[in-house]
């Protein structure tokens, strides 16, 4: 049986791979943060998956690639430059939903790091629910929302 040659990784795969190194993250931790398995992360970054001994090209769905890009700090413009406008648009939509914060002020806060570590262990849908709940409890928000000091256990 003749061996198939590995497909060349697409430009977005090289972009993600380089950004992963710059971000100094392991593929496993980045995959977890993106809400995908580390095996799937490797398939997308390598550009292929093995099926019955054949190496089949892999193209990441736009939303998956957008989550991967967000984790490693790839911008929507970089995704567009790599030929993935669909993923760039998905990333822009994700960023539009995320509230902007003064990150310099809280960059080294261990409490925030602990919450983020816990949050990254959840699947993407659960992460979104937690963030939705946090947004409803932000002090200074609408009068009809519950603020943290108004919540009671039980």
Image: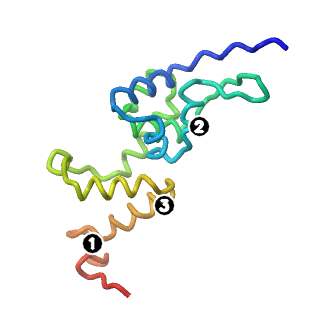
Q: Secondary structure at mark 3?
A: helix
| Residue at image mark 1 | 142
Q: Which element type, helix, strand or loop, lies under badge 1?
A: loop
The mark found on residue 39 in the picture is: 2
Point out the residue furthest to the right here: 1
Please give the name of the residue rendered at 14% of the width and 49% of the height, measured from the top-left corner. Answer: 105
Q: Is residue 114 above or below residue 146?
A: above
- The circle drawn on residue 88 is none
Question: Which sits earlier in the primary sequence, circle 2 or circle 3?
Answer: 2
Q: Residue 18 appears in which quarter of the rendering?
A: top left
Question: Above or below — where is 100 with respect to 5?
Answer: below
**Could you classify mark 3 by the number of other residues whose Cα lies within 10 Å: few (under 14), some (14-19), or many (20 or more)?**
few
**CA distance for labels 2 and 3:** 21 Å
Q: Which mark is residue 126?
A: 3
Per the model, the C-alpha gap separating discs 2 and 1 is 43 Å
Q: Left of 57 or right of it: where is 131? A: left
Towards the viewer: 111 or 95: 111
Image x and y of residue 146, in percent: 30, 77
Mark 2 and mark 3 in contact? Answer it, CB < 8 Å.
no
Residue at 66% x, 16% y is 6
> In the drawing, does residue 126 fall left or right of residue 146?
right
Q: Quadrant of residue 48?
A: top right
- In screen coordinates, is 84 left or right of 5? left
Residue 69 higher or lower than 105, as above or below? above
Badge 1: residue crowd in 10 Å (few <14, some 14–19, many ≥20) = few
Nearer to us: label 2 or label 1: 2
> Which one is earlier in the sequence, the residue at label 3 or at label 1?
3
């Amino acid at each position: 049986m003749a061996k198939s040659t590995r497909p060349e990784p697409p430009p977005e795969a090289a972009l993600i791979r380089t950004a992963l190194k710059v971000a100094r993250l392991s593929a496993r931790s980045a995959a977890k943060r993106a809400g995908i398995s580390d095996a799937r992360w490797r398939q997308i970054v390598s550009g292929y998956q093995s099926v019955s001994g054949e190496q089949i090209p892999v193209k990441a769905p736009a939303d998956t690639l957008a989550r991967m890009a967000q984790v490693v700090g790839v911008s929507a413009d970089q995704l567009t430059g790599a030929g993935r406008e669909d993923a760039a648009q998905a990333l822009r939509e994700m960023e539009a939903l995320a509230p902007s914060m003064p990150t310099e002020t809280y960059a080294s806060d261990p409490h925030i790091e602990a919450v983020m570590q816990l949050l990254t262990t959840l699947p993407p849908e659960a992460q979104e629910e937690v963030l939705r709940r946090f947004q409803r409890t932000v002090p200074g928000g609408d009068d009809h929302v519950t603020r943290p000091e108004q919540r009671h256990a039980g």
